[in-house]
Amino acid sequence: MAIFLHRVGRIAFRHRWYVVLVWAAVLALAGFGALSAPKASDEGFSMPGIESQKAFDLMEQRFPGTAADGASARVVFVAPDGERVDAGGNRRAVEAAVASLAEGPQAVSASDPFRAKALSQDGRTAYATVTYEAGPKDLTAAARDRLKGAVEDARGAGLTVEVGGKALDEGGGPGGTAEATGVAVAALVLLVTFGSLAAAGLPLLTALIGVGVSLASILTLAHALHLSATTSILAMMLGLAVGIDYALFVVSRYREERSRGHEPREAAAVAAGTAGSAVVFAGLTVVIALAGLSVVGIPMLTKMGLAASGAVTVAVLIALTLVPALLGFWPNAVLTRRARAGRAGRAGGTGGTGGTGGGRSARDDAPKDATEGWGTRWARFVLRRPLPVLLLGVVGLGALALPMTDLRLGNPGDEAKPVSTTERRAYDALAEAFGPGFNGPLTIVVDARGTKDAKDAVRTVARRIGDTGGIVSVSPARFNEAGDTAVFQAVPSTAPTDERTKDLVTSIREERPEIVSGTGVTFAVTGTTALDIDIAGKVQSALVPYLTVVVGLAVILLLLVFRSLLVPLKAAAGYLLSVLASLGVVVLVFQQGHGAGLLGAEHTGPIMSLMPIFLVGIVFGLAMDYEVFLVSRMREAYVHGRTPGESVTEGFRHSARVVAAAALIMVAVFAGFVSEDDSMIKMIGFGLASAVLLDAFVVRMALVPAVLALLGHRAWWLPARLDRLLPRVDVEGEALHRRPAGTDTPPSGTVAPREVSRT
């Protein structure tokens, strides 16, 4: 591995113009494809195998022309205090608005609230439901303008009018503020870390190129693969974060090799062979975690995972090829000012050719400077007190994980949006006028095919469901043209995200045989509320298999990388601590409400159903990034003759500062998405930022050195039989140190690698 990537780095450095032109051509082709590709179709959200989805599919089959999850708008009219909405000018304003909406572009129907009895008991509030023939993403500007115009006309008559539903949801991802914030903070961190504008700018430039290639490719394939707008969100988050990090590690190793006396081309090659090997395996763990999302069985999640894994793959390829190529254009610009001045002063001597004299002097000086860094001091502190550090870290993470025992899953709706949005105000107005359960009615789909008296059977089912405790009202049934399928709504007495609503849905389904007894029909419970409940159940049932697959594959991968039995197990255990703690923090803020106002989360409630899967998958890959980068330097020192304690110190001396910078960059990128209005993006950004912060600075920086200090030589033990069976992958660059003497050989003084696979 190291030898191959060493050659790749040399070739990229030497033929830098060709490499840059190839990536420029790839970016141009991807961009052209994105501009010329047809618009992605909006197929909505689907969850095969659950009752709610089966009912939706049955509705689309038996009620052709009406999408079960198509765009709709619920227009809420509220009369001024002391007035009724069904009297005088208020009534005329409502009827005029409904007539305008019914004649609007793409509109299928608009219900008259007075005929449909959609009027509150006090007469102040009424609502009209507008259905469209297209999904929210496919609604035209003319359809939305007609909706907004009708609302403004009614408001002009003195009514308070708000709009709920999906019709005003234009889709799309973050608006750009989040990415700009993350890039700005990343630039600042890189500048402080490297002390060079060129060194700080190069990872940013290559990461943005990688994100550009990835997003353009996703847009190109969106129509053919039926990718939604949300598919690109995860790819953008991870592509930007790992793109900066991977380039950061290669540039950092390049600077280190230059300080050891290597000439620029060899330094770039060694950086590609060593740090590049770590990048490959770190990227592979992320790809495994993301591709493993397909185990859950949710098509949207599978597509998001595969798209994001593609973005990570692009980031790895750029770090191995484009970064060395760009270093070839500015070989000295990425060095610190002092290093550039020192090389200029030695120009008349060794000339930076990597000779033994100049190279040895630079190498001897580097450790002396580096040992004064905080990374070395912290490593020595942990080595002196490994057990207290370990106990404190485990107890702290365990305390943060405690709120996770109260985890409730669901999908936040309009109630989680800011009160500045019309959707949230419409939700609150309906809840106040008609009860908390009105915003989450249960849709009952009755399959009466083969029944002699379908209408009578449906009436019986509706009556029995209406008599169920927790149901406040049942709407009249609507039959299809064939008369063999009916749909009606049952309104619960509790809010959609209330645990009692979940119990109600479960109760109705369990009592189904009794409810349909003697009718000859069957029914299914669906609707947004039931769908959220089913999704949460499916995610919970898939979490353990997914965790097993991802962790198992990654442990095997780390076993190959470190050739140790205990280090991969320790890495997996540390990851579990960090992911549980981050889930606990998410519950603490978004479910229990502690500090939610500071993040702009105005409503607390169940955690998004997919959040545990996102954290389990994505954070595992990112956590293994830091494990590979940090521990690979420790193993590199160990196999070259250092003691276990010295290896830990050596790893921190070389990698702690860079790993800390990489973690801060990821935290900044993810935290930038907290500023978004979309509750899903806000929660994902906060959860990922918290997880990276805890994993990098508590698990990897504290627990890892503490455990390695306690294990000593046993940390690097591998049974002899297993050692013979496992293929050897050179991540630490051992083969580079064993190369025959010749051009660009490493500086003298290299310690021969030791055999670490035996006790």
Image (tube, helix red, strand yellow):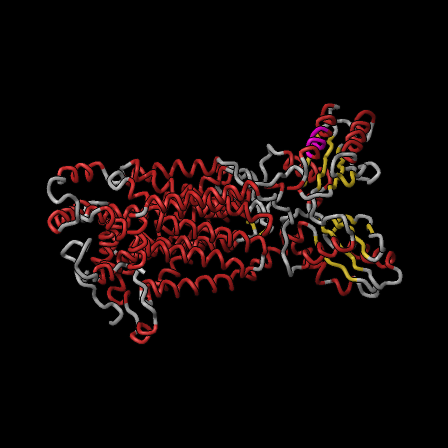
Q: Where residue 83 sits in the image (x, y, percent)?
A: 77, 27
Q: Nearer the viewer, residue 738 or 49?
A: 738
**Position in image of residue 208 (x %, y %):** 42, 41
Depth check, front residue: 659 or 75 = 659
- Number of marks drawn: 0
Judged from this view, the residue extending furthest toward the bottom is 721
Give the magenta part as a residue range: 144-149
Please, is residue 729 above or below residue 17 in the view? below
Q: Quadrant of the N terminus?
A: bottom left
Viewport quadrant of the C terminus? bottom left
| 45 to 89, vertically: above or below | below
Residue 303 relative to residue 66: left or right = left
Query: Does 5 lie within the magenta span?
Result: no
Visible residue check, residue 525: no
Residue 72 place in picture, x, y as percent: 71, 41
Residue at 43% x, 65% y: name it: 552
Q: Does residue 37 appear in this view?
A: yes
Name the residue rendered at 28%, 46% in the picture: 252
Tell me which corner region of the image, top left, top right, bottom left or bottom right, holds residue 703.
Answer: bottom left
Dominant secondary structure, magenta:
helix
Residue 343's image quarter? top left
Q: Quadrant of residue 463?
A: bottom right
User: Looking at the image, which residue is at 14% across and 55% down?
Assistant: 748
Q: Percent from the top left, x then y, of residue 18? A: 36, 46
Q: From the viewer's perspective, tell me whether residue 554 is left or right of residue 458.
A: left
